[in-house]
Image: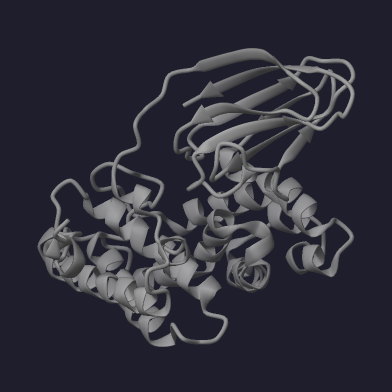
Amino acid sequence: MIPNLDMIFGDFFDDPHIINIRFYNFGKNLLGHLIAANTAHEYDAIIATVTAKVNDFGKDLGEVDTSTITGFGKRKTNDELLASFKKTMSDEEPFIARSLGIDSTEYLDFYPHKISEYSGATKLRMNILSNRVNVAATANATALGAPLTTILKSFFTDWEINRTAQETQKGVVHDHKGDAITTRKALELAILTAIHTVGLKYPGDVVSAGALFDFTLLFAVTRHKQIDLVGTIEKEEIKELANRLFTDTATITFSNTGINADLEIYLSGTIDGLPTSYAITVKPGQSSVIKPSHLGDLKNPFLLIKNTSTINEGSYEVVILG
């Protein structure tokens, strides 16, 4: 097979199907991965370059709300950032406690004064609190996983960018679509350089190199209707529930309808993968409403369950919405 030179050396981000906001989100996500992987400082130069180009592109987009995935969004105000930060620190606290241990010093790095410190946060405290979360998320990136780490770290960056923009522009939002063409091209080239930089570290190792790049963010996610699954699972059996890429726009309601067996649910990169530290255990007669990112890396396409009993059969009901 003759290699496609355009895909190897060309600018494959120069694609009209990759809208600006998705490319901006992809750049921010890549930064989170690079920073987390930069343990030996081999990515210092490319992180500095990509950071500058992401910031320039974001300003020309009017500092759009990064939760919007179609077209141009509105500027996310400081009030909106604060509200999103408070909600995230509340919603994610159970997962952080389970991942790090509620009595651990790592957990206290996030919640030294309990969760109420975040629920009562003000804009005057936002810089301090978001920086604390940024530092703690960086230190615990492996335990928390890349998706959540990126979200937690983004609050400090977004707050600084938004505050600077408001100070310099007096809150005036201009239409920078023309400028965005130039800054987008600069970001495209910076990310292409990042790809080749990572490839130089992992020549021929698709898994290791690819772990830093979530290309699914570049294109619209196929919408799925509600899926209802009911079944039984033998002792120690691993069963596939779904094979698709999830985002946190979906919700998974998992009910253990049996009476004698604990069931674990998790995301895996293979159809027969064993439960990881992200696996959530649901006991007989109980249910759990779960965000996909709490089950593992969102790049893993297999939603699996395992019956942990060595003796008893189990049963389940699953509703996947979104």
Res. 107 visible in picture: yes
Q: Position of residue 283 (x, y in %)?
A: 84, 27
Residue drawn at (29%, 70%) of the image:
191
| Rendered position, 147 above or below 241 | below
Q: Position of residue 256 (x, y in %)?
A: 77, 20
Image quarter in which the N terminus is found:
bottom left
Q: Position of residue 163 (x, y in %)?
A: 43, 70
| Total numbered labels | 0
| Rendered position, 258 above or below 130 | above
Residue drawn at (51%, 45%) of the image:
300
Q: Position of residue 205 (x, y in %)?
A: 42, 67
Q: Is residue 315 left or right of residue 30?
A: right
Quarter of the figure with residue 162? bottom left
| Rendered position, 192 above or below 288 | below
Quarter of the figure with residue 201? bottom left
Q: Is residue 169 left or right of residue 14?
A: right
Q: Is residue 98 left or right of residue 21?
A: right
Q: Nearer the viewer, residue 313 or 190?
A: 313
Res. 176 visible in picture: no
Q: Which residue in the rendered view is the most extreme toward the front? A: 1
Q: Nearer the viewer, residue 318 or 291?
A: 318
Residue drawn at (38%, 74%) of the image:
203
